[in-house]
Amino acid sequence: MVTEAIPTRAEVSDVANAIVDGADAVMLSAETAVGEHPVAAVEIMNRIAAEADRYSDHLSRAVPANEFCRGVTAAVAHSIQSVAEHVDAVAVAIWTEKGVLARLLSRHRINQPILALTPSDAIRRRLALYYGVTSATVHKPQETRECLQKADDVLAREGWAKIGDPIVMGFGPASMEWGDTGSITIHRLGARRP
């Protein structure tokens, strides 16, 4: 769509296939940088992506079994998805220092919004590219209780959850303490913790 107002079959196919294949983001370059119809190109790409996303909803949400998806962090991501569905969680919050848990969880295309807390602005910016993930930079908490409180504060402020709503909180390996193997906590927003 650099010069034309209507996309070619190949352009439509490229965008749709990217969404069905699980891409977190699609991008236009020449169409918006030097194209004759930049606004139309973005609007059409958005419509194609939304339709492809609706189509792909009926496909399996299982992450393909490959080396990237094995290990403790992948197991935590898979478990978060399962737990969130079983407890009807309204949101998922995770603590991630390198973004790996957020990336793996994003690939599951869970139904709940994902809040990723990280101590790094660079990681926070990278997380913006992952499907379904909103991120916030926070100082590294000293203990799990403090991390839960930070997640509750952001979830309530953003209007994703209200007092008493079930939340699933996940931690990747070595998130909070040396030797940690990853963990999942289920709690209600605003609940008092010892």
Image (cartoon, rainbow, N blue to C red):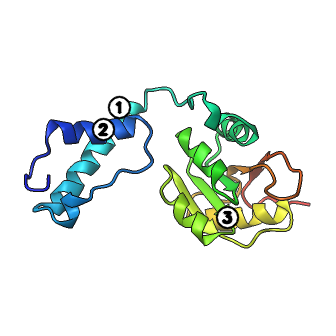
The structure residue drawn at horizontal position 56% and vertical position 63%, both measured from the top left corner, is 159
Q: Mark 2 belongs to which amino acid?
A: Ala
Residue 146, given in percent of the width and then of the height, sits at: 81, 66
Q: Mark 1 belongs to which amino acid?
A: Tyr
Q: If you read the primary sequence from the N terminus, does the residue marked by circle 2 or circle 3 appear first? A: 2
Q: In which quadrant of the rendered view does residue 11 lie?
A: top left
Residue 57, given in percent of the width and then of the height, sits at: 43, 32
Can you tell which of label 1 and label 2 is closer to the viewer? 2
**In-front residue for pair 55/10:** 10
Q: If you read the primary sequence from the N terminus, does the residue marked by circle 1 or circle 3 appear first? A: 1
Mark 2–mark 3 CB contact (< 8 Å): no
Residue 24, given in percent of the width and then of the height, sits at: 45, 48
Tag 2: Cα neighbours inside 10 Å, few (<14), some, or many (≥20)? many
Question: Does residue 112 sit above or below 125 in this rendering?
Answer: above
Tell me the distance, in whole angstroms, between the alpha carbons under discs 1 and 3.
33 Å
Say which quadrant the C terminus sits in. Answer: bottom right
Tell me the distance, in whole angstroms, between the alpha carbons under discs 2 and 3.
31 Å
The structure residue drawn at horizontal position 70% and vertical position 60%, both measured from the top left corner, is 97
Residue closest to the far left: 4
Residue at mark 3: 118
Q: Secondary structure at mark 3?
A: strand
Residue at mark 2: 16
The structure residue drawn at horizontal position 26% and vertical position 43%, both measured from the top left corner, is 48
Q: Which mark is residue 55?
A: 1
Tag 3: Cα neighbours inside 10 Å, few (<14), some, or many (≥20)? many
Q: Secondary structure at mark 2?
A: helix
Mark 1–mark 2 CB contact (< 8 Å): yes
Q: Mark 3 belongs to which amino acid?
A: Thr
